[in-house]
Amino acid sequence: MSQAASPTVYKPEQLDIHFSEAQIQQRIQEMAGQINETYAGCDKLIIVAVLKGSFMFVADLIRHIKIPCQIEFVRLASYGNGQVSSGSVKPVDLSLPSLSGENVLIVEDIIDTGLTLHFFMDYVKSLHHTQSLRLAVLLDKKEARQNEVQVDFSGFTVGNQFLVGYGLDYAGYYRNLPYIGVVRDAGQFTEG
Ligand code: IMP
Ligand code: MG
């Protein structure tokens, strides 16, 4: 009986650090400043974070948000091969309260082809008449975009390379790293 080959697991010390913990935290403070300015005068903001990848980013971002806010989570998974994003989105948990009449900020770790966020933004728009709907991403792989998505707040523009750490995984690993590193020859995306 044949067994599936286990993915090569890269050790953190084998990664090239692309964004240090300090760089990430500095940029997040700047992004929060832009968000606070944009929503100044609003009495409430609903932040919807897309799991799994955004858990660390949203946790750090919201510490700097001055507008009274509620935090909601949805979970989407993407699958595919190689160092390019997958061709399908699997909604795992899309349960949300009514967002009608609310200022809504979607928070995601990384936008690549744009498929995931194109799907999710359309989903929200089709179900909820929000007062406003914006998107914050920590990382934007602009060159890889195949689906039009408006990014309102962006942390860093990155090239077409596979990144891990700070919420981003390779085969489920590396999400816990406080920095973002580059993996070469990554075999397969897992999820979220
Ligand atoms: P998109 O649908 O092609 O925009 O891809 C979005 C999803 O693919 C992200 O939410 C991540 O889960 C995953 N992804 C894209 N690029 C990377 C990467 O460099 N490292 C880890 N995950 C990634
Ligand atoms: Mg993600």
Image: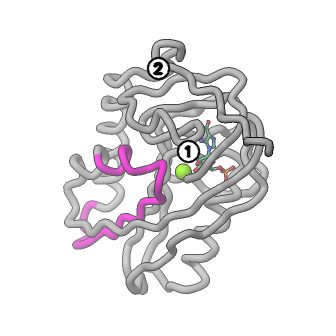
Which one is nearer the viewer's eye here, 141 or 131?
141
Q: Which numbered disc, 2 or 1, marks the residue closer to the eye?
A: 2
- Residue 23 shows up from this direction: yes
- Residue 142's spot in the image, x, y percent? 68, 39
How far is mark 2 from mark 1, CA to CA?
20 Å
- Residue 26's spot in the image, x, y percent? 32, 29
Quadrant in which residue 88 is drawn: bottom right
Which one is nearer the viewer's eye here, 41 or 112?
112
Q: Is residue 114 left or right of residue 151?
A: right
Quadrant in which residue 183 is drawn: top right
Image point (60%, 69%), residue name: 91
Q: Is residue 175 left or right of residue 85?
A: left
Q: Is mark 1 within 8 Å of ligand 1?
A: yes
* Quadrant assignment for ligand 1: top right
Give the magenta-colored segment's residue range.
40-59
Task: Check if residue 24 falls in the magenta segment.
Answer: no
100 up-or-down from 18: above or below: below
* Residue underneath mark 1: 110
Q: Is mark 2 within 8 Å of ligand 1?
A: no
Image point (65%, 57%), residue name: 149
- Residue 181's spot in the image, x, y percent? 51, 23
| Badge number at residue 12 | 2
Disc 2 vs disc 1: Cβ atoms closer than 8 Å?
Answer: no
Q: Secondary structure at mark 2?
A: helix
Image point (27%, 52%), residue name: 62
